[in-house]
Amino acid sequence: MLFKEKFLRPPGARSEKEFLSRCLQCGQCAQVCIFDCITMRRGFNFFMAGTPEINPKKAPCHLCMRCSAICPSDALHDVPIEEVRMGFAVLDQKKCYTWTEYLLCRSCYERCPIKWRAMRLERGEYPIITDECAGCGLCEHVCPADAIVITPTRFQTSSGTREDEA
Amino acid sequence: MKKPTLTFYRRLFQLFVAVIFIIVPILNRSDYSAVYGNFLSLHAFGIPLADPLAVLQLTVKNFYLTLDNFIGTLLPLLLAFFLGTVFCSWVCPYGLFSEWTQNLSKRILPKSFKGLPVTRNGFPLKLVVFVVGFILFFIFSTTPILNQLSTAAWYARFFQYLFGQDIISWCFLFLLALLAVEFFAQKRLWCKYVCPQSILIILTKNLNKKRLKIGFDEEKCICKPGYERCEMACHLTLNPKQVNIPREMECSNCGSCVVACNRMGNALSFQFPYGEQYQLGQKLKKLLPGRAVLLKTGIALLVVAGLGTGTYFSVQNIMLSDSRPEIKSALLADKKISWHNSKAEYFELLADGTLICVGGDWPTEGFKGWQWQPVGDNGSFKIIRHSTNPEESEYTIVRVDGKLTGSSHVTLENSHNKEGEVKEVEAGTSEQQTIGIYETLQNNHLEQATSMDSRVILNRYADEVYILDLKVFDQGGKKIKKVLSEGDLITTEGMLTAVHKWINSPVITASEGSPPALPIHTRMELRYHDGRTKKISFITTKSVDRTSEVFEDLWF
């Protein structure tokens, strides 16, 4: 509430309001995550404490979908991997090493779990992100230039309000 | 020796639960556990358990109940229906700490200190907390905020934060503050007056008049009025002798009063659900089968199960033994063989046709995945390398001059078999070598050997650029979870994603301009989804010449 920050919910999360009203804050998704990418939010905000979030800078989601399978209250519901929309990767072409012709880097493309569909190489070199991006954050995690940032699809703020930005 | 009292067993169980919730996050961190969750919702060996209050909040808000939550709520409520609020006295870790605090306070503080003089019925206040919290949740909040009042959940969450995320949560201060207040009040204030989690189980247990209760036999009571041991023993400041008054619903069946009374007149005792006091126990006993019938049924079941498993395994063994006929070649079966300039330190030819490469370019634990077949009678054999495409397999024929001995000469012929069509031996691919090792195999490496899972290759490219490639193939797909690798040249951690093949990136350049110092040690650890781990160490002694290859890929 004091500061606004944007964060990702695990894959399969419902819309923020519905998600919060269903989340039991039991932390099972964080415990079942074998990549340790889901963390439980902490702090004195009673409305958010204990709910799961993903920080792709620290550990990206690998879309293994264990969390949505174990969620007892269906706050994370089972969706096929192709339909996951946790967020959307935004590539800053002014920072990207390949786009700025600084060096040939393919870190993001090599790691993308849905290569060539979510991320393509324009002219065989320059990465671009298509609408099929699931927002898992693997590319943000590996990007050496910090050129990629995942923006949550439903720009959430810590107060739980929604700002419908593009 | 003193016989342990009921309180001893209760403490043991409470401690067990408290320790379980410390161990579970640690186990989960090391990627193996059958238990997940905290006191709000829990999966234990596939059985869901949930806090009834938390589920009630979700259900009222969303008009939606999942099967998991339904079963999870039903189990604790059924427990309460038959045994009363034993959760509070036998399971809840806050209850344990609260009781300890009270005991400590009574022991440390002077006898004259009487604590907070509150003896009122706690249930109305609980109900107020419950209703206010529920209304607040329903109108203002989207999150079930009554969950935040669950002290048991905070206890479990502290360890979830600590061992799951290496974060020290300050929530334990909240618990410590509560305990400090209770220390000086000498009363279990939170459990008695606030805890909204107990509301639903208290209401449920009141539905059943014949549940587990404390029974009182007035004739046996020998305590002087005002010095009742049972009343002193009760952690919730109740009077156990008033059995059927409304305040009895606060009793959590902890049994402290029964234990205290056992030393005196033995007037208090448990009334078991549907026990003799309720006249139903007799009827049930008549309905239940006798001991002899049970014994016979048990033996019959055991015999059937034993026979079943026996048949199953014997059938499996027959099927397995049929699939791999042994190769009867006295010269080659179960032999260790190598020749000069072979890429392995030696090859192991197992009788079942498996070929294991040990050392050299392969891991010292051995590398399994290829097959061998005898060619002719003089000890020549064929190494069949299956590529990822089953229709396309390459093979090398090791042709022996004369009969195979420790000093014979062998000729290697590389060939490949594409789509069933055998090609002629390519010109220039054969080379002659001398046998180095040829002896009978004592212990094979089959157990430790990796399959086609992983490789470490040193490639030599043009301009004397040496690049180390670490490769992992996930054969069935999605079996390998993590690949950890370290060695002389690398300290990296790679991970498998949804792909079947993993190659380290960025590229590891061993050296440029001159050959690297050999051998290069590399250790890899494969972690599988089913909990297995496989540690492989590679000693790379040679480089693969790729100077003549032309790369169209822009990456190079």
Image (cartoon, coloured by chain):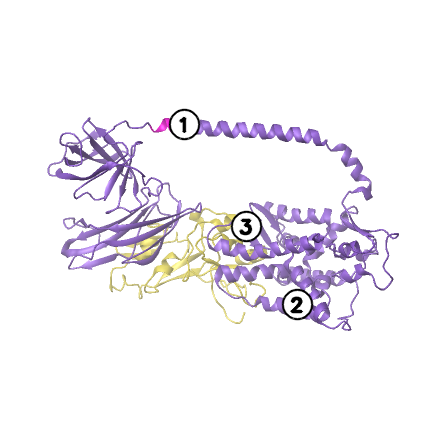
Chain colours: A yellow, B purple
Q: Is residue B373 visible?
A: yes
Q: Mark on residue B35?
A: 3
- What is the chain letter for disc 1? B
When the figure is inspected, residue A143 is found, relative to residue B321, above or below; the finding is below
Tell me if B461 is positioned left or right of B492 in this view: left
Where disc 3 sits, the SS reads strand
- What is the chain letter for disc 2? B
Q: Are marks 3 and 2 in contact (CB under 8 Å)?
A: no
State which tag comes first along the sequence, 3 or 2.
Answer: 3
Q: Which residue is mark 2?
A: B179
Q: Mark on residue B319?
A: 1
Span highlighted in magenta in the image: B320-324
Is B329 in front, or is B210?
A: B329
Q: Residue at x 62, y 45 (%)?
A: B71
Does B49 lie within the magenta span? no
Where is residue B39? Give x, y as percent.
Answer: 61, 55
Q: CA distance from mark 3 to mark 2?
A: 28 Å
State which tag comes first along the sequence, 2 or 1.
Answer: 2
Tell me if B70 is positioned left or right of B491 in this view: right
Q: Residue at x 24, y 51 (%)?
A: B540
Where is residue B121? Give x, y as percent.
Answer: 79, 62
